[in-house]
Amino acid sequence: MELFTWETNMLIVGFLMILAGCYCMIRTYHMLKIIIGVEVAMKAVTMFLILAGRINGNMDLSQAFVVTVIVIEVIVAVVFAGVTIGLYKKYGNMDIRNLTQLKG
């Protein structure tokens, strides 16, 4: 009997990816690093959806959810990138503490 099955390994890797993404978002003030942290956490969510579909034997539904999550992930990344570009153009750096100075 195996000590760790592939399901257990996927769960462990997924939780580590979520922890790494959250740590990356919390620990820094640099906007690009925060975007990378969000992307890493979202990849773990995608992996969990695929794992759940495989365990339940319903891969079709999980693939539909994965496509939806990927679309949402791209939209979030593009919006964050737009805010980051605007922040850099206005202040010359990507420090999120400058966002409190914006008006409007």
Image (spheres, rainbow, N blue to C red):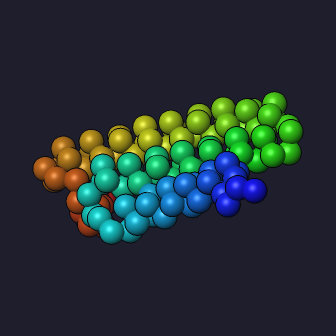
Determine if residue 79 is in view. yes
Determine if residue 18 is in view. no
Q: What is the quadrant of the C terminus in the image? A: bottom left
Outermost residue toward the front in this view:
1
Numbered circles on residues, count? 0
The quadrant holding residue 99 is bottom left
The quadrant holding residue 58 is top right
Residue 77 position in % (x across, y down): 44, 41
Q: What is the quadrant of the N terminus in the image? A: bottom right
Give the answer, above or below, for where 76 lies relative to 59: below
- At a point 81% along the width and 46% down the height, the residue shown is 55
- At a point 43% along the width and 60% down the height, the residue shown is 20
- At a point 78% along the width and 40% down the height, the residue shown is 54
- At a point 27% along the width and 42% down the height, the residue shown is 85
Outermost residue toward the right in this view:
57
Q: Camera-side residue: 8 or 83?
A: 8
Residue 40 position in % (x across, y down): 46, 49
Residue 33 position in % (x across, y down): 31, 53
Residue 21 position in % (x across, y down): 44, 58
In the displayed structure image, the side of residue 99 where residue 53 appears, left or right:
right
Give the answer, above or below, for where 35 lies relative to 23: above
Outermost residue toward the left in this view:
92
Q: Camera-side residue: 93 or 66?
A: 66
